[in-house]
Image (cartoon, rainbow, N blue to C red):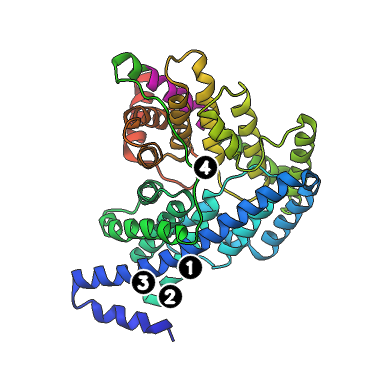
Amino acid sequence: MPFLNLKSFSQKLERFPLGAYLLKWGIISILVSALIGTGSALFLTGLHWATDTRELNSWLIYLLPIAGLTIGYFYHQYGVSVVGGNNLLIDEVKKPTKRIPFRMAPMVVLGTIMTHLFGGSAGREGTAVQMGGAISDQFTAIVGLTDYERKIIIAIGISGGFAAVFGTPLAGFIFAFEVLLLGKKRFLAIIPCIVTAFLSDYFCTIWGVGHTQYTIFEVPNITLTNTLWATLVGIISGIVAMTFSRSTHFFSTSFKRYIKYAPFRPFIGGIVVALAVILIGTTKYIGLGIPSIVASFEEQMLPYDFILKLIFTAFTLGAGFKGGEVTPLFFIGATLGNVLIWFVPLPLSLLAGMGFLAVFAGAANAPIACILMGYELFGMESSIYISIACIAAYYFSGMKGIYSSQSFHYGKTYLYKKLLRSDS
């Protein structure tokens, strides 16, 4: 019997369309938000513990291959149905088949914490999004949702997970719409997604979990010259985003092609990453890399920081370790923007902020979410510069982003077709 007989309650509400819609999705959004916000708080706390423990015990890097073998084995034995991660969520929205197993949530959370504890280079967005999607989709059976309503429930899970882990509800709300193409009825998902994004962030913060603060210290006046420089920053960011996406897909394909037994992939990958960390003598390029991101807004970084972080992250994720791509993309983008101070006559912190978001915009094909994230993180003053950089990065990042199952918006596809026709 469904919990609180919500399915029967939902059917009765159908007699009052608008009121039923608001009440039904209001209740669902509150319940989903409480679960996602609390889960995100626990996840972020665990991630913070893993990072601190690794930095205080550098010998843990030697155990990265064993951690990889453990993660790979458990996914091979118990997680074959959820190994698709974010792409599984996108596929289920495109063509609903069966409910996402709840085991996706604890498996990806534990896998990500292990990846960070023992020295892999990964992020956290993918984990939060998968956790949110897995939690929210359980309400499909509880409430008795239609196929299209199931698309909405997955979308609100993605919105809530993204918003809670970064503290950016507006970006979380839009991120789900940009990554998922919800069809002609997408307006039905607007209210549930935006409510879930804000409430998930709220439920996460009431547990005392904070988010990193970044600051753009100086923003020059908008001029034609500065606009052109911002566009150049976006183009370079788009090319770097494309390089990251293709590198991750290359490593993933190569591991699958040459190492047939799945648990051995992160094991071998862990050996390579551990040896690389030992040889270069720094842990700067593993984990989230938040100290380096913060430093990028304030001081000159090494010119190869973004390249090494790109390689470490693409290789780690390609080998089968768990985590997201977004925070490493922030690292790559911020340090890239930092380096561009060499020839782009804009303030250092502004360049870091533009790169921070533009590389992510290009890699995830989500420029609008990144523009809103810029507003939420940095305020209105830098919004025009960030908007220009994100849009340029989106158009110059190629046709394949970090989510292989993602469909592209008409505008980008149309532009590419026009360019190809003009070349012929």
Q: Which residues are magenta?
A: 229-242
Is 410 left, or right, of 202 in this rendering? Answer: left
How far apart, in angstroms, are the residues tagged by discs 3 and 2?
Answer: 7 Å
Name the residue carrying label 1.
Answer: 99
- Residue 145: assigned label: 3
Rendered location of residue 180, percent (x, y)? 39, 51
The span from disc 2 to disc 4 (Cα, nearest Å) is 31 Å
Residue at point 68%, 44% (across, down): 120
Q: Amino acid at mark 1?
A: Arg
Dot 3 alpha-carbon crowd within 10 angstroms: few under 14, some 14 to 19, many 20 or more: some
Residue that carries the numbered disc 4 in the rendered image: 326
Check disc 4 and give the amino acid type: Val
Q: Nearer the viewer, residue 297 or 251?
A: 297
Q: Position of residue 183 (x, y in %)?
A: 31, 53
Mark 2 residue type: Ala
In contact (CB < 8 Å): disc 3 and disc 2: no
Q: Quadrant of the C terminus?
A: top left
User: How many tags in the picture?
Assistant: 4
User: Three-letter amino acid code at disc 3?
Assistant: Leu
In which quadrant is the N terminus drawn? bottom left
The residue indicated by pointer 2 is 141
Which quadrant of the structure image shows residue 285? top right
The residue positioned 47% from the left and 37% from the top of the image is 214
